[in-house]
Image: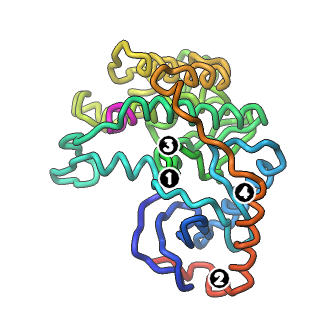
Amino acid sequence: MIQANNQELPVPGGVLIARGATGWVYKINNRIALKIPRKGSHEEFACEVKFYNILESHSPPCPDISRSFLRVPKGNFMAFCSGGSLDQRLQEHQTRGGKSQQFKILGINKCEPLHLVEQWAAELSSAVAWLESLGYCHTDIRPANLLFDEQDHIKLTDFDCWEEVGSPALGSAPPWARVLGPEAGSDCGSFGYNGARVEQFAIGSVLYMMTRGHEPYEDGTCAPEESSNVVDLLQQMRFPSLGEGVLDNIIDRCWNGGYPLLKDLADETKLLSRAHNIPRAVALTEEYCKEIQEECQQLIESGLLEGIKEGSLLI
């Protein structure tokens, strides 16, 4: 999702806070965010709604996954996460310049505290392990799809690309996915199959970005003639240098497919020393969710969605 502030919804009280390929997200109040489909993205939006219906059929819910209160064809009413996304937070710590303000990193002004990074590693791993236990993969794990609540707990969101474990992987942009190399045999040149290998590779790159403040290869450590072809570097398993710390060991194992199951990754990260004694997130109570669901229904009945037409919010 792309941060987009100070854009008003065509209904009083709504403020545009994020834009993505599938939908735009508006803050309705301190409890509720509303995601609406973009023009031409209704199929993907319906796919995400279907997945939230699946998640809601399993109890208890995972506290590390964004909560949807109410879903209708024109919108998905979700829990508002006041901390924004990991992507937004890390960009705030970066200094960029040169001819391309968007791509060239001049410096990292601040790195997140390690106890928070370890907490987020445990929470993200818990989310994907829970999905794995249900037979599903997120397939689009990256900083823009990781939100923070008011207590800095991380929430995995955006499920328009979900797939079943074992289905052919369609891949994603580097460094969140890797084209397989000769080590994969007949699967060389493809992204393989959805499962622990695909998900943990993305998590390794996310953890690298959490600990360094930038994406792999983005700091100019690789030769200029190679920096434009990250796909090849990843396929050749020429990963950025890592240290000996516990987080770097986890990153290395994730990049090399060292966890047979995502549960194995979750079991390791939940024991990280700096995060071990930090209170974990708890799922919203069913009573609270029912109360907010009724509020969402009242918003619909008051005409909140009546001004929303396909494409009417594109600028």
In front: label 3 or label 2:
2
- Which one is earlier in the sequence, the residue at label 3 or at label 2? 3
User: Is 213 within the magenta?
Assistant: yes
Disc 1 to disc 2, C-alpha distance: 25 Å
Three-letter amino acid code of the residue under disc 1: Glu
Write down the residue under mark 2.
304
How packed mark 2 is, by other alpha carbons closer than 10 Å (few <14, some 14-19, many 20 or more), is some
Residue at 74% x, 44% y: name it.
61
Q: CA distance from mark 2 to mark 4?
A: 23 Å
Across and down, in percent, residue 128 comes to 64, 35
Residue type for callout 2: Leu
**In this picture, residue 23 sits left or right of residue 18:** right
Q: Is residue 181 left or right of residue 90?
A: right
Give the image location of residue 27, x and y in percent: 53, 69
Residue positioned most to the left: 98
Instruction: Give the SS element for disc 2.
Output: loop
- The residue wearing badge 1 is 150
Residue type (three-letter) at the residue carrying disc 4: Cys
Q: Does residue 258 sit above or below 14 in this rendering?
A: above
Quadrant in the picture for the C terminus = bottom left
Q: Residue at x 46, y 55 (%)?
A: 84
Q: Is residue 178 visible?
A: no
**Of the two numbered discs 2 and 4 in the rendering, the one whose residue sits closer to the viewer:** 2
Q: Earlier in the sequence, mark 1 or mark 2?
A: 1
Image location of residue 279, percent across then percent down: 56, 35
Q: Which residue is mark 3?
A: 142
* Residues at discs 3 and 1 in contact (Cβ within 8 Å): no
Query: Of the residues tagged 4 and 1, which is closer to the observer?
Result: 1
Per the rendered image, the range of residues in magenta is 210-216
